[in-house]
Protein backbone atom coordinates (compact mmCIF):
# COMPACT_ATOMS: atom_id res chain seq x y z
CA UNK A 1 0.00 0.00 0.00
CA UNK A 2 1.42 3.35 -1.09
CA UNK A 3 1.12 6.13 1.46
CA UNK A 4 1.82 9.80 0.85
CA UNK A 5 4.42 11.22 3.18
CA UNK A 6 6.59 14.27 3.45
CA UNK A 7 10.07 14.06 4.85
CA UNK A 8 10.44 17.76 5.47
CA UNK A 9 9.81 18.53 9.13
CA UNK A 10 7.51 21.51 9.60
CA UNK A 11 7.18 23.41 12.85
CA UNK A 12 3.85 22.90 14.48
CA UNK A 13 2.09 25.94 15.77
CA UNK A 14 -1.17 26.89 17.43
CA UNK A 15 -3.02 24.28 15.37
CA UNK A 16 -1.20 21.48 17.17
CA UNK A 17 -1.98 22.96 20.59
CA UNK A 18 -5.66 23.32 19.72
CA UNK A 19 -5.80 19.77 18.42
CA UNK A 20 -4.10 18.48 21.58
CA UNK A 21 -6.68 20.22 23.78
CA UNK A 22 -9.50 18.86 21.61
CA UNK A 23 -7.99 15.40 21.74
CA UNK A 24 -7.82 15.55 25.54
CA UNK A 25 -11.47 16.63 25.67
CA UNK A 26 -12.51 13.80 23.36
CA UNK A 27 -10.51 11.30 25.37
CA UNK A 28 -12.03 12.31 28.67
CA UNK A 29 -15.52 12.30 27.14
CA UNK A 30 -15.07 8.72 26.01
CA UNK A 31 -13.40 7.67 29.22
CA UNK A 32 -10.20 6.59 27.50
CA UNK A 33 -8.06 8.73 29.74
CA UNK A 34 -9.01 6.97 32.92
CA UNK A 35 -6.34 5.92 35.34
CA UNK A 36 -4.32 2.97 34.15
CA UNK A 37 -3.21 -0.30 35.61
CA UNK A 38 -4.71 0.29 39.02
CA UNK A 39 -3.76 -3.18 40.10
CA UNK A 40 -0.41 -3.22 38.36
CA UNK A 41 2.46 -3.82 40.73
CA UNK A 42 5.25 -1.33 40.60
CA UNK A 43 8.25 -3.21 41.90
CA UNK A 44 10.49 -1.49 39.40
CA UNK A 45 10.30 1.92 40.99
CA UNK A 46 11.14 2.90 44.53
CA UNK A 47 7.89 4.80 44.87
CA UNK A 48 6.16 1.46 45.37
CA UNK A 49 2.76 0.37 44.19
CA UNK A 50 1.58 3.56 42.59
CA UNK A 51 -0.52 3.51 39.47
CA UNK A 52 1.50 4.74 36.54
CA UNK A 53 -0.88 7.19 35.05
CA UNK A 54 -3.71 9.41 36.10
CA UNK A 55 -5.54 11.43 33.49
CA UNK A 56 -3.89 14.79 33.23
CA UNK A 57 -6.19 17.65 32.32
CA UNK A 58 -4.89 19.37 29.20
CA UNK A 59 -4.32 22.60 31.14
CA UNK A 60 -1.88 20.84 33.51
CA UNK A 61 -0.17 18.77 30.84
CA UNK A 62 3.58 18.94 31.15
CA UNK A 63 5.40 20.91 28.53
CA UNK A 64 7.25 18.22 26.61
CA UNK A 65 9.35 19.54 23.72
CA UNK A 66 8.15 18.33 20.34
CA UNK A 67 8.86 18.88 16.70
CA UNK A 68 7.32 17.84 13.42
CA UNK A 69 8.71 14.65 11.91
CA UNK A 70 6.85 15.08 8.60
CA UNK A 71 3.36 14.15 7.46
CA UNK A 72 1.61 10.99 6.36
CA UNK A 73 -1.56 11.06 4.26
CA UNK A 74 -1.85 14.75 5.18
CA UNK A 75 -1.58 14.11 8.93
CA UNK A 76 1.21 15.59 11.01
CA UNK A 77 3.66 13.24 12.67
CA UNK A 78 5.05 14.70 15.89
CA UNK A 79 8.22 13.61 17.69
CA UNK A 80 8.37 14.29 21.43
CA UNK A 81 11.55 14.37 23.50
CA UNK A 82 11.28 13.10 27.08
CA UNK A 83 14.22 13.95 29.36
CA UNK A 84 14.86 13.21 33.02
CA UNK A 85 17.13 14.92 35.54
CA UNK A 86 19.89 12.37 34.92
CA UNK A 87 19.97 13.38 31.25
CA UNK A 88 18.40 10.22 29.84
CA UNK A 89 16.46 11.14 26.72
CA UNK A 90 13.77 9.20 24.85
CA UNK A 91 12.21 10.31 21.57
CA UNK A 92 8.79 8.95 20.69
CA UNK A 93 6.45 9.76 17.80
CA UNK A 94 2.69 9.47 17.43
CA UNK A 95 3.14 7.42 14.21
CA UNK A 96 3.05 3.81 15.44
CA UNK A 97 3.98 5.01 18.93
CA UNK A 98 7.51 4.50 17.69
CA UNK A 99 10.39 4.94 20.15
CA UNK A 100 12.89 6.55 17.79
CA UNK A 101 15.82 6.90 20.15
CA UNK A 102 16.91 6.14 23.71
CA UNK A 103 20.01 8.01 24.86
CA UNK A 104 21.67 6.59 27.97
CA UNK A 105 25.16 7.01 29.47
CA UNK A 106 27.99 4.49 29.42
CA UNK A 107 30.19 3.89 32.47
CA UNK A 108 32.15 7.10 31.67
CA UNK A 109 29.03 9.20 31.40
CA UNK A 110 29.02 9.35 27.59
CA UNK A 111 25.51 9.30 26.18
CA UNK A 112 24.55 7.44 23.05
CA UNK A 113 21.39 6.22 21.35
CA UNK A 114 20.93 2.49 22.00
CA UNK A 115 17.73 2.02 19.95
CA UNK A 116 17.85 1.12 16.27
CA UNK A 117 15.77 3.34 14.01
CA UNK A 118 15.78 5.88 11.21
CA UNK A 119 16.38 9.62 11.04
CA UNK A 120 13.41 10.23 8.71
CA UNK A 121 9.72 9.36 8.50
CA UNK A 122 9.91 7.99 4.96
CA UNK A 123 12.05 5.05 6.01
CA UNK A 124 9.71 4.28 8.91
CA UNK A 125 6.78 4.23 6.50
CA UNK A 126 8.42 2.32 3.68
CA UNK A 127 10.76 -0.20 5.25
CA UNK A 128 10.46 -0.42 9.01
CA UNK A 129 11.08 -3.95 10.37
CA UNK A 130 9.02 -2.86 13.41
CA UNK A 131 11.79 -0.70 14.95
CA UNK A 132 10.48 0.81 18.21
CA UNK A 133 6.77 0.50 17.47
CA UNK A 134 3.63 -0.54 19.31
CA UNK A 135 2.79 -3.93 17.87
CA UNK A 136 -0.81 -5.15 17.70
CA UNK A 137 -3.67 -6.03 17.61
CA UNK A 138 -1.83 -9.32 17.93
CA UNK A 139 1.94 -9.09 18.35
CA UNK A 140 3.90 -12.04 16.91
CA UNK A 141 2.43 -14.71 14.64
CA UNK A 142 -0.98 -16.25 14.14
CA UNK A 143 -0.79 -19.46 12.11
CA UNK A 144 -2.19 -19.29 8.58
CA UNK A 145 -3.94 -15.99 9.36
CA UNK A 146 -6.94 -17.61 10.97
CA UNK A 147 -8.43 -18.36 14.37
CA UNK A 148 -11.75 -19.29 15.93
CA UNK A 149 -13.61 -17.51 18.69
CA UNK A 150 -16.97 -18.64 20.06
CA UNK A 151 -17.45 -20.92 17.07
CA UNK A 152 -16.80 -18.16 14.49
CA UNK A 153 -13.80 -18.33 12.15
CA UNK A 154 -11.87 -15.10 11.61
CA UNK A 155 -9.44 -14.49 8.77
CA UNK A 156 -6.73 -11.88 9.08
CA UNK A 157 -4.16 -10.81 6.49
CA UNK A 158 -1.26 -13.12 5.74
CA UNK A 159 1.72 -10.76 5.68
CA UNK A 160 4.46 -13.25 6.61
CA UNK A 161 3.71 -16.16 4.35
CA UNK A 162 1.93 -18.41 5.38
CA UNK A 163 1.15 -16.59 8.65
CA UNK A 164 0.06 -13.26 10.08
CA UNK A 165 2.82 -11.26 11.77
CA UNK A 166 2.36 -8.38 14.22
CA UNK A 167 -1.34 -7.79 13.56
CA UNK A 168 -1.42 -7.94 9.76
CA UNK A 169 -0.67 -5.59 6.87
CA UNK A 170 -1.91 -2.53 8.75
CA UNK A 171 -0.93 -3.28 12.32
CA UNK A 172 -0.93 -0.78 15.17
CA UNK A 173 2.57 0.28 14.09
CA UNK A 174 1.14 1.97 10.98
CA UNK A 175 -1.40 4.34 12.53
CA UNK A 176 -1.13 7.79 14.03
CA UNK A 177 -2.10 7.57 17.69
CA UNK A 178 -3.94 10.35 19.55
CA UNK A 179 -1.26 11.55 21.91
CA UNK A 180 -1.25 13.75 25.00
CA UNK A 181 1.68 14.60 27.27
CA UNK A 182 1.07 13.36 30.83
CA UNK A 183 2.62 13.80 34.24
CA UNK A 184 2.49 10.67 36.40
CA UNK A 185 3.74 9.60 39.81
CA UNK A 186 6.70 8.06 38.06
CA UNK A 187 7.68 10.80 35.65
CA UNK A 188 6.54 12.60 32.53
CA UNK A 189 5.34 10.74 29.52
CA UNK A 190 2.98 10.37 26.62
CA UNK A 191 -0.42 8.76 26.63
CA UNK A 192 -1.38 7.36 23.25
CA UNK A 193 -4.80 6.06 22.35
CA UNK A 194 -6.68 4.78 19.41
CA UNK A 195 -9.89 3.00 18.63
CA UNK A 196 -9.23 -0.05 16.50
CA UNK A 197 -12.62 -0.46 14.86
CA UNK A 198 -14.57 -3.70 14.69
CA UNK A 199 -13.33 -5.64 11.67
CA UNK A 200 -10.00 -3.81 11.37
CA UNK A 201 -7.65 -6.33 9.72
CA UNK A 202 -10.44 -8.88 10.27
CA UNK A 203 -10.39 -8.83 14.10
CA UNK A 204 -13.76 -8.65 15.88
CA UNK A 205 -14.75 -5.91 18.35
CA UNK A 206 -14.16 -2.21 18.70
CA UNK A 207 -10.95 -2.18 20.69
CA UNK A 208 -10.11 0.95 22.72
CA UNK A 209 -6.37 0.92 23.32
CA UNK A 210 -4.22 3.20 25.48
CA UNK A 211 -0.46 2.90 25.65
CA UNK A 212 1.40 5.12 28.10
CA UNK A 213 5.10 5.73 27.91
CA UNK A 214 6.80 7.21 30.98
CA UNK A 215 10.44 8.13 31.49
CA UNK A 216 11.22 7.74 35.19
CA UNK A 217 13.89 9.47 37.24
CA UNK A 218 15.54 6.04 37.64
CA UNK A 219 16.46 5.80 33.97
CA UNK A 220 13.54 3.57 33.15
CA UNK A 221 11.20 3.62 30.21
CA UNK A 222 7.92 2.31 31.50
CA UNK A 223 5.11 1.21 29.21
CA UNK A 224 1.56 0.55 30.40
CA UNK A 225 -1.01 -0.96 28.07
CA UNK A 226 -4.77 -0.95 28.53
CA UNK A 227 -7.43 -2.28 26.18
CA UNK A 228 -11.17 -2.88 26.32
CA UNK A 229 -13.53 -4.29 23.72
CA UNK A 230 -17.25 -4.41 22.96
CA UNK A 231 -17.10 -7.92 21.45
CA UNK A 232 -14.93 -10.91 22.28
CA UNK A 233 -11.57 -10.61 20.53
CA UNK A 234 -7.88 -11.46 20.85
CA UNK A 235 -5.21 -9.00 22.02
CA UNK A 236 -1.46 -9.20 22.40
CA UNK A 237 0.44 -5.92 22.62
CA UNK A 238 4.13 -5.22 22.86
CA UNK A 239 6.81 -2.73 21.97
CA UNK A 240 9.20 -3.82 19.25
CA UNK A 241 12.34 -1.80 20.04
CA UNK A 242 15.63 -3.21 18.80
CA UNK A 243 18.66 -2.44 20.95
CA UNK A 244 22.41 -2.29 20.66
CA UNK A 245 23.82 -1.24 24.02
CA UNK A 246 27.10 -0.17 22.43
CA UNK A 247 25.04 2.30 20.38
CA UNK A 248 22.89 1.88 17.29
CA UNK A 249 25.12 1.28 14.29
CA UNK A 250 28.00 0.02 16.46
CA UNK A 251 28.00 -3.42 14.81
CA UNK A 252 27.22 -6.84 16.15
CA UNK A 253 25.41 -7.53 19.44
CA UNK A 254 27.02 -10.99 19.68
CA UNK A 255 29.23 -9.95 22.62
CA UNK A 256 26.28 -8.70 24.67
CA UNK A 257 25.65 -10.95 27.66
CA UNK A 258 22.05 -11.96 28.10
CA UNK A 259 20.14 -13.45 31.00
CA UNK A 260 16.57 -14.63 30.47
CA UNK A 261 14.49 -15.58 33.48
CA UNK A 262 13.08 -18.60 31.67
CA UNK A 263 13.66 -22.31 32.17
CA UNK A 264 11.44 -23.11 29.17
CA UNK A 265 10.67 -21.90 25.67
CA UNK A 266 8.23 -22.66 22.89
CA UNK A 267 9.95 -24.43 19.96
CA UNK A 268 8.67 -23.53 16.51
CA UNK A 269 7.99 -25.21 13.18
CA UNK A 270 9.75 -24.03 10.06
CA UNK A 271 7.30 -21.13 9.66
CA UNK A 272 8.14 -19.93 13.19
CA UNK A 273 4.79 -21.03 14.65
CA UNK A 274 5.05 -22.76 18.06
CA UNK A 275 4.59 -26.52 17.89
CA UNK A 276 2.58 -26.27 21.13
CA UNK A 277 5.20 -28.06 23.18
CA UNK A 278 6.91 -26.29 26.06
CA UNK A 279 10.53 -27.40 26.19
CA UNK A 280 13.20 -26.92 28.84
CA UNK A 281 16.18 -24.81 27.75
CA UNK A 282 18.59 -26.80 29.93
CA UNK A 283 21.55 -28.33 28.07
CA UNK A 284 20.69 -26.52 24.83
CA UNK A 285 21.98 -23.31 23.17
CA UNK A 286 18.62 -21.77 24.12
CA UNK A 287 19.68 -21.62 27.77
CA UNK A 288 20.19 -18.05 29.01
CA UNK A 289 19.26 -18.72 32.63
CA UNK A 290 22.73 -17.44 33.53
CA UNK A 291 24.59 -14.65 31.67
CA UNK A 292 25.74 -15.90 28.27
CA UNK A 293 27.08 -14.09 25.24
CA UNK A 294 24.38 -13.88 22.59
CA UNK A 295 26.80 -14.98 19.89
CA UNK A 296 28.45 -17.86 21.74
CA UNK A 297 26.20 -20.60 20.35
CA UNK A 298 24.14 -18.78 17.73
CA UNK A 299 25.74 -20.52 14.70
CA UNK A 300 25.11 -24.03 16.04
CA UNK A 301 23.30 -25.51 13.04
CA UNK A 302 23.08 -28.90 14.76
CA UNK A 303 20.50 -27.39 17.02
CA UNK A 304 17.55 -27.32 14.65
CA UNK A 305 15.67 -24.50 16.39
CA UNK A 306 18.55 -22.11 15.78
CA UNK A 307 18.79 -23.21 12.17
CA UNK A 308 15.05 -22.65 11.63
CA UNK A 309 15.21 -19.18 13.15
CA UNK A 310 18.54 -18.25 11.54
CA UNK A 311 19.49 -17.54 15.12
CA UNK A 312 17.26 -16.73 18.07
CA UNK A 313 13.65 -15.93 17.20
CA UNK A 314 11.84 -17.66 20.03
CA UNK A 315 9.32 -17.09 22.75
CA UNK A 316 10.66 -17.80 26.23
CA UNK A 317 8.26 -18.87 28.98
CA UNK A 318 9.03 -16.66 31.94
CA UNK A 319 9.51 -18.35 35.32
CA UNK A 320 6.46 -17.56 37.41
CA UNK A 321 5.24 -19.09 40.66
CA UNK A 322 1.96 -20.12 39.02
CA UNK A 323 0.52 -19.96 35.49
CA UNK A 324 -1.92 -17.19 36.42
CA UNK A 325 0.66 -15.02 38.20
CA UNK A 326 0.78 -11.58 36.58
CA UNK A 327 3.13 -9.80 38.93
CA UNK A 328 5.89 -7.57 37.61
CA UNK A 329 9.00 -9.76 37.46
CA UNK A 330 12.48 -9.49 36.04
CA UNK A 331 12.33 -11.08 32.60
CA UNK A 332 15.71 -10.24 31.08
CA UNK A 333 19.02 -8.54 31.72
CA UNK A 334 21.51 -7.56 29.02
CA UNK A 335 25.06 -6.31 29.59
CA UNK A 336 27.42 -4.80 27.05
CA UNK A 337 30.98 -5.18 28.35
CA UNK A 338 32.76 -2.36 26.48
CA UNK A 339 30.42 0.47 27.43
CA UNK A 340 29.34 -1.13 30.71
CA UNK A 341 25.70 -0.45 29.87
CA UNK A 342 23.07 -2.82 31.21
CA UNK A 343 19.39 -3.05 30.46
CA UNK A 344 16.86 -4.91 32.58
CA UNK A 345 13.34 -5.74 31.49
CA UNK A 346 10.54 -6.27 33.97
CA UNK A 347 7.11 -7.33 32.83
CA UNK A 348 3.69 -8.58 33.84
CA UNK A 349 3.54 -10.75 30.69
CA UNK A 350 3.99 -14.55 30.60
CA UNK A 351 6.51 -14.58 27.74
CA UNK A 352 9.30 -12.73 25.99
CA UNK A 353 10.33 -13.10 22.34
CA UNK A 354 14.09 -13.01 21.94
CA UNK A 355 14.89 -11.99 18.36
CA UNK A 356 18.55 -11.59 17.46
CA UNK A 357 18.02 -9.36 14.44
CA UNK A 358 18.37 -12.30 12.03
CA UNK A 359 16.62 -10.67 9.10
CA UNK A 360 18.63 -7.43 9.13
CA UNK A 361 20.60 -7.66 5.90
CA UNK A 362 22.43 -4.38 5.39
CA UNK A 363 19.61 -2.79 3.41
CA UNK A 364 18.59 -0.40 6.20
CA UNK A 365 20.65 2.56 7.37
CA UNK A 366 20.38 4.02 10.88
CA UNK A 367 20.66 7.65 12.00
CA UNK A 368 24.45 7.30 12.33
CA UNK A 369 24.73 6.47 8.63
CA UNK A 370 25.72 2.88 9.42
CA UNK A 371 24.08 -0.11 7.72
CA UNK A 372 22.27 -2.57 9.93
CA UNK A 373 23.52 -6.08 9.17
CA UNK A 374 22.42 -9.42 10.58
CA UNK A 375 22.80 -9.45 14.37
CA UNK A 376 23.39 -5.69 14.70
CA UNK A 377 20.45 -5.35 17.09
CA UNK A 378 18.24 -7.51 19.26
CA UNK A 379 14.61 -7.28 20.32
CA UNK A 380 13.13 -8.59 23.55
CA UNK A 381 9.39 -8.40 23.14
CA UNK A 382 7.33 -8.96 26.29
CA UNK A 383 4.14 -10.70 25.24
CA UNK A 384 1.71 -13.57 25.41
CA UNK A 385 2.91 -16.56 23.43
CA UNK A 386 2.76 -16.59 19.62
CA UNK A 387 -0.32 -18.14 18.03
CA UNK A 388 -2.15 -18.39 21.37
CA UNK A 389 -5.58 -18.06 19.70
CA UNK A 390 -4.89 -21.47 18.11
CA UNK A 391 -3.12 -23.03 21.09
CA UNK A 392 -5.59 -23.97 23.85
CA UNK A 393 -2.80 -24.87 26.30
CA UNK A 394 -1.14 -21.44 26.13
CA UNK A 395 -2.22 -18.57 28.42
CA UNK A 396 -5.31 -17.05 26.86
CA UNK A 397 -5.22 -13.89 24.75
CA UNK A 398 -9.01 -13.63 24.56
CA UNK A 399 -10.51 -10.38 25.77
CA UNK A 400 -14.23 -10.23 26.50
CA UNK A 401 -16.46 -7.18 26.86
CA UNK A 402 -16.34 -5.87 30.43
CA UNK A 403 -12.81 -7.19 30.97
CA UNK A 404 -9.65 -5.12 30.82
CA UNK A 405 -6.43 -6.08 29.13
CA UNK A 406 -3.58 -4.57 31.16
CA UNK A 407 0.13 -5.07 30.75
CA UNK A 408 3.24 -3.31 32.03
CA UNK A 409 6.85 -3.48 30.89
CA UNK A 410 9.77 -1.50 32.30
CA UNK A 411 13.12 -1.16 30.54
CA UNK A 412 15.73 -0.04 33.08
CA UNK A 413 19.16 1.31 32.09
CA UNK A 414 22.27 1.36 34.28
CA UNK A 415 26.03 0.80 34.05
CA UNK A 416 28.20 -1.87 35.66
C1 LIG B 1 9.78 -11.73 14.84
C2 LIG B 1 10.71 -11.99 13.69
C3 LIG B 1 10.46 -10.95 12.66
C4 LIG B 1 10.65 -9.61 13.26
C5 LIG B 1 10.29 -8.58 12.24
C6 LIG B 1 10.06 -10.39 15.37
O1 LIG B 1 9.18 -10.10 16.41
O2 LIG B 1 9.91 -12.71 15.83
O3 LIG B 1 10.50 -13.26 13.14
O4 LIG B 1 11.29 -11.12 11.55
O5 LIG B 1 9.83 -9.45 14.37
O6 LIG B 1 10.91 -7.45 12.48
Image (cartoon, rainbow, N blue to C red):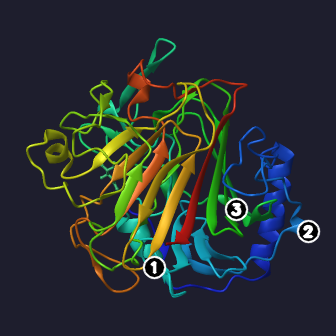
Residue 152 seen from this side? yes
At 28% from the left and 45% from the top, the residue drawn is: 160
> Residue 179: which disc?
3
Q: Is residue 310 above or below residue 416?
A: above
> Residue 59: which disc?
2
Mark nearer the N terminus (1 vs 2)? 2
Q: Are marks 1 and 2 in contact (CB under 8 Å)?
A: no
* Mark-to-mark CA distance, 2 and 3: 15 Å
* Left or right: where 286 falls relative to 18: left
Q: Is residue 166 above or below residue 341?
A: above
* Left or right: where 383 falls relative to 82: left
Q: Position of residue 263 (x, y in %)?
A: 37, 36
At 61% from the left and 34% from the top, the residue drawn is: 326
Q: Position of residue 72 (x, y in %)?
A: 52, 69
Q: Are marks 1 and 3 in contact (CB under 8 Å)?
A: no
User: Which residue is the site of mark 1?
Assistant: 120
Residue 72 seen from this side? no
* Mark-to-mark CA distance, 1 and 2: 31 Å
Q: Position of residue 222 (x, y in %)?
A: 64, 58
> Image quarter for residue 130?
bottom left
- Provide the secondary structure element on which disc 3 rests: strand
Mark nearer the N terminus (2 vs 3)? 2
Give the camera-side residue of 91 and 263: 263
Mark nearer the N terminus (1 vs 3)? 1
Give the camera-side residue of 333 and 378: 333
**Residue located farthest toward the left when viewing the structure as drawn:** 302
Amino acid sequence: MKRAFSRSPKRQGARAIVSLIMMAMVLSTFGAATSLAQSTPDAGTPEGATPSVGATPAADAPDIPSSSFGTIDGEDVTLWTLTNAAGMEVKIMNYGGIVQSIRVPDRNGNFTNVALGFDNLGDYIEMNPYFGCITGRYANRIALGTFELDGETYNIPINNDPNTLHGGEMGFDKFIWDTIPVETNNGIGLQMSRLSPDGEQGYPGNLEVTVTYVLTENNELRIDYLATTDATTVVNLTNHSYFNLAGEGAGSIFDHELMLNADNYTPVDDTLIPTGVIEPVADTPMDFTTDEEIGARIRNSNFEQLFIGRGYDHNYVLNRPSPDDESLILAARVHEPTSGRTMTIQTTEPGIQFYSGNFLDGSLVGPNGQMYRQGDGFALETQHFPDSPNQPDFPSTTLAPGDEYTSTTIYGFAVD
